[in-house]
Amino acid sequence: MRHGIGVFVSPPTVVQRLDSRDRLSKARRERNKAAFLAEADAQGFAPASSVRVWFEPAQDFAELLGMAEDAEICVRDRVMRADGQPVMLAVSRLPREITRGTALEEVETGAGGSLARLEELGFGIARHEEVVGARMPDANERQLLGLGAGPVLTVRRRTWSGERVVEVNDMVMSGAGYELRYGWDAI
């Protein structure tokens, strides 16, 4: 038995969610840079994602999307990876009346991602609202993100086109694998 040789733990992959004013901008989408891909790539990580798409009644998301509970929504469920390590789960919900028969219902939405497709369909992006939180992960999140003990960060983003909410995106990030950075000018 050799003494002095312990367990070596590699440092976690930490992706910074950069606070740039153009993070979700049309200009970035036109350069084919969806937010996660651009942030991971800019920090030297190889970004990747796996995507599942399905349809279901709006139910719990009806009020957030401003639609009837029995109206159908398109659900885009993604696992985001940096250098092969899962760092974020993202589930977008969009009204099916917008997505039906479009690239938004495909695994690969194309250059610029979902927001670019919404704009091509005539739903110009007017604004976003994000609510950030932290909590303990559920068993599924723990397994998908490969987590041990410790909290996750949560972000719920709503995106508007004019006065209409066109997407609700719920993101869950490893507390040890993701960093949120915010900044603003003093008034």
Image (spheres, rainbow, N blue to C red):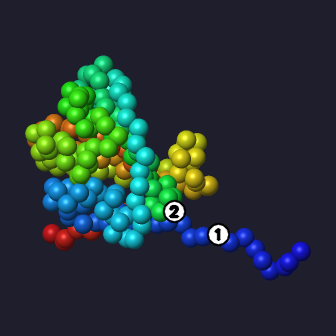
Q: Position of residue 52 (x, y in %)?
A: 41, 38
How far separated are the C-alphas under marks 2 and 1? 14 Å
Residue occupying image coordinates x 42% and y 63%: 46
Q: Amino acid at mark 1?
A: Val
Left or right position of 128 against 84: left
Residue occupying image coordinates x 58% and y 54%: 147
Q: Position of residue 150 (x, y in %)?
A: 57, 56
Number of numbered markers: 2
Mark toward the start of the polypeptide (2 vs 1): 1
Give the number of the disc on residue 176. Answer: 2
Viewer-side residue, 179 vs 50: 50
Q: Amino acid at mark 2?
A: Ala
Q: Position of residue 76 (x, y in %)?
A: 35, 38
Q: Would you place residue 103 above or below residue 144 in this image? A: above
Left or right position of 102 against 143: left
In the displayed orientation, state which residue is furthest to the bottom. 4
Give the number of the disc on residue 9. Answer: 1
**Which of pointers 2 and 1 indicates the residue nearer the eye?**
1
Q: Position of residue 88 (x, y in %)?
A: 44, 53
The local secondary structure at tag 1 comes to loop
